[in-house]
Amino acid sequence: MDRTWYTGNADDDAGENRSWLVGHFKDPSDIRHSKDTEVKWSTHPQGDARHDWNPGNHDGTVLILVSGRWQLDLRTDGHLETVVLERPGDYAVWGRGVDHTWEALADSIMVTVRWPSLT
């Protein structure tokens, strides 16, 4: 029988699926399986970075700073903007066609939500 709820700890469960907690990659019998949304909880030591541009393949992404300090570079159609998330709760939202890179300027905890969940 499929369970209609799940309780856990995001930090503990982040070891699965490259820190993604909800999305198409979960077993279809798991309540955390979704074709509509992906949710990620990630921890990053200071200096951790993604220098390669991640393509903007999702309709939408929201990135929320839980703790730390985070630099986010957003690029579309030759336009580049750098933003720094500094206060808990600072966030950025972007849509399809916006590429991004990032760097943890301090030890950081982030929550990312993307839609839809791409297969």
Image (spheres, helix red, strand yellow):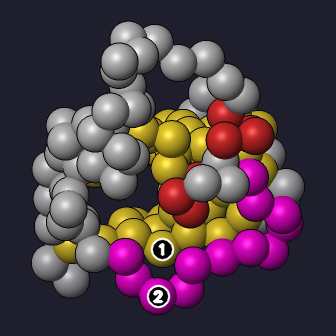
Q: Which residues are magenta?
A: 43-54
Nearer-N-terminus badge (1/2): 2
Residue 34's spot in the image, x, y percent?
26, 36
Identify the residue position indicated by label 2 in the image.
Answer: 52
Amino acid type, residue under disc 1 in the picture: Thr
Residue closest to the eye, 47 or 6: 6
Residue 23 visible in the current orientation: no
In this rendering, the answer to whether 27 lies above or below 55 is above
Do tag 1 and tag 2 residues touch (Cβ < 8 Å)?
A: yes
Is disc 2 surrounded by few (<14), some (14 to 19) or many (20+) residues within 10 Å? few
**Magenta segment main secondary structure:** strand
- At mark 2, the secondary structure is strand
Q: Separation of disc 1 and disc 2 at Cα? A: 6 Å
- At mark 1, the secondary structure is strand
Q: Is residue 47 magenta?
A: yes
Identify the residue position indicated by label 1 in the image.
Answer: 101
The residue lying at 35 percent from left, 18 percent from top is 1
Residue 72's spot in the image, x, y percent?
52, 62
Question: From the image, which quarter does the C terminus lie in?
Answer: bottom left
Determine which quarter of the picture holds residue 99: bottom left
Is disc 1 surrounded by few (<14), some (14 to 19) or many (20+) residues within 10 Å? some
The residue lying at 36 percent from left, 45 percent from top is 27
Residue 62's spot in the image, x, y percent?
38, 41
The residue lying at 50 percent from left, 50 percent from top is 20
Q: What's the mark number on residue 40? A: none
